[in-house]
Image (spheres, helix red, strand yellow):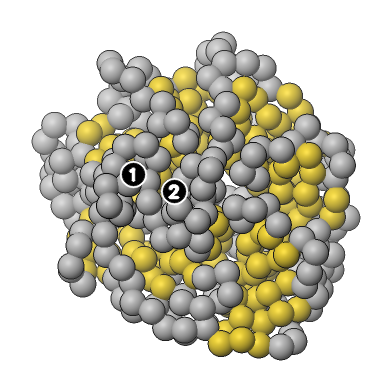
């Protein structure tokens, strides 16, 4: 896992990879996840119970980029809404104009959302660690893809179901399994998904899976430790290790060559995400470190601008709002906080919690669509690359 290293920063250490966007049965107070078949045709699946709860009250704090104390506005308590992930038959719908984030607990991950003002911090679901990296299909109602282990200690596979459950799930990778799955996103056109996985000691790698019939095997694209599919479904931006440091690339999908767009020798540039029209990216870097700060750039890597300057705090997991005028992110220093940053104003601290990780900001229609919310690139938590070269891509297939 990437750790934003430095003794004073207490940075995102030891985080379990996790995701955003969940499906919950209507009208129940407990969420039962993964009881029943493995999705491979019959073996007993792992049984795990998640929970729903009322949201907790939070206080939003405005601050400069390097401090976290100023005026406050109090959040409100709300009750988690249970649904199948759709509203009025509309596919891919999640609570609208909310900042989704995950919060690691002792043996579960809480998936929560909060209003950009800091109001209504709401628990959406609590899931066991045997589920990782899941995403709604933006164009098909009640269709969700997720990584899971069919039983404790087994290999990881990609599944499809109408809920995040192994009961009745369809195995999307019947011919291949992985030691871990650390991120998954369905493209906004619903035609393919991209995920991160590793096997047999390999580096974290990015795979492309066409959602066609018959279902093909996943195709290896490149090494990657973070990625985000463009809201236009035509390319992916991702970070990976090169020569002992981190660089950021773009690549057309489904075919095409990678282009390096951000690279500073000896420095870590990672965790990029597009804005809604894919004209800009936000990313984390230690180029002015040792801490990791946030930067914004044109999608081709030009016009790089520093957004935060926090000597004792590292920032990662950033996402744009629909208008591209603000970002949400997680800051880790003496405390770990979920923050909102207007590109022309001071930081607003929305919440503090030691287990916070990445963010995703939904749009006015609650969908993972270019015209609405940010696509849910899920299951991604800050990682620190080792300074050793990754295994070569001997098994890479040309695209």
Label 2's element? loop
Instruction: Report the number of numbered marks.
Output: 2
Judge by depth and name the residue closer to the eye, 355 or 216.
Answer: 216
Relative height, residue 243 to residue 304 (above, below):
above
Residue 221, how many percent across, how many down? 56, 23
From the viewer's side, name the closer residue of 130 and 339.
339
Residue neighbourhood size for the residue with mark 1, other residues' Cα within 10 Å, grouped as few (<14), some (14–19), many (≥20) = many
Q: Which residue is mark 2?
A: 367
Relative placement, left or right, of 54 versus 257 is left
Query: Of marks 2 and 1, which one's residue comes earlier in the chain?
Result: 1
> Is 47 on the left-hand or right-hand side of 139?
left
Task: Give residue 272's quadrant in the image.
Answer: top right
Q: Left or right: where does residue 395 sit relative to residue 20?
A: right
Which mark, by number, is residue 393? Answer: none
- Residue at x 78%, y 49% (from the top left corner): 296
**Image coordinates for residue 244, horizontal then vertical, percent:** 77, 37
**Residue that numbered label 1 is attached to:** 91
For the point 74% across and 87% down, the residue is 70
Of residues 174 and 70, the one drawn nearer to the viewer in this rendering: 70
Q: Is residue 219 above or below residue 154?
A: above
Say if mark 2 contacts mark 1, CB within 8 Å.
Answer: yes
Q: Secondary structure at mark 1?
A: loop
Q: Is residue 265 above or below residue 30?
A: above
Q: Quadrant of residue 310?
A: bottom right
Name the spot of residue 77 as percent of width and height, x first: 42, 83
In this orientation, which residue lies closer to the viewer: 390 or 24? Answer: 24
Residue 366 at what x, y percent from top left?
Answer: 44, 54
């Amino acid at each position: 896992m990437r750790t934003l290293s430095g003794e004073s920063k207490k940075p995102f250490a030891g985080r379990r990879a996790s995701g955003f966007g969940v499906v919950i049965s209507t009208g129940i107070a407990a969420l039962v996840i993964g009881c029943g078949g493995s999705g491979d045709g019959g073996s007993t699946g792992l049984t795990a119970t998640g929970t729903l709860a009322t949201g907790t009250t939070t206080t939003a704090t405005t601050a400069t980029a390097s401090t976290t104390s100023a005026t406050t506005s109090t959040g409100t308590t709300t009750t988690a809404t249970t649904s199948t992930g759709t509203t009025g038959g509309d596919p891919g719908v999640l609570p609208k104009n909310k900042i989704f984030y995950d919060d690691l607990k002792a043996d579960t991950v809480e998936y929560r959302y909060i209003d950009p003002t800091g109001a209504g911090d709401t628990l959406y679901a609590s899931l066991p660690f045997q589920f990782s990296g899941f995403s709604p299909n933006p164009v098909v109602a009640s269709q969700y893809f997720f990584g899971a282990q069919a039983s404790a200690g087994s290999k990881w596979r990609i599944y499809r179901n109408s809920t995040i459950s192994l009961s009745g799930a369809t195995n999307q990778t019947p011919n291949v399994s992985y030691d871990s799955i650390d991120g998954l996103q369905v493209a906004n056109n619903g035609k393919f998904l991209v995920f991160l996985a590793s096997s047999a000691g390999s580096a974290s790698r990015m795979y492309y899976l066409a959602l066609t019939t018959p279902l093909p095997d996943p195709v290896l694209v490149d090494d990657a430790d973070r990625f985000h599919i463009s809201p236009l479904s035509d390319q992916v931006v991702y970070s990976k290790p090169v020569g002992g440091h981190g660089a950021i690339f773009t690549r057309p999908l489904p075919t095409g060559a990678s282009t390096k767009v951000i690279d500073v020798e000896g420095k870590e540039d990672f965790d990029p995400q597009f804005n809604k029209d894919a004209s800009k990216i936000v990313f984390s870097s230690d180029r002015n470190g040792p801490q990791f700060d946030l930067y914004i750039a044109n999608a081709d890597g030009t016009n790089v601008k520093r957004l935060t300057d926090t000597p004792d705090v590292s920032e990662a997991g950033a996402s744009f709002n629909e208008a591209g005028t603000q970002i949400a992110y997680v800051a880790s220093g003496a405390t770990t906080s979920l923050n909102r940053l207007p590109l022309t104003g001071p930081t607003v601290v929305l919440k503090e919690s030691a287990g916070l990780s990445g963010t995703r900001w939904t749009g006015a229609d609650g969908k993972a669509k270019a015209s609405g919310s940010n696509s849910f690139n899920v299951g991604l938590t800050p990682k620190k690359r080792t300074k050793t070269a990754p295994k070569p891509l001997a098994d890479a297939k040309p695209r």
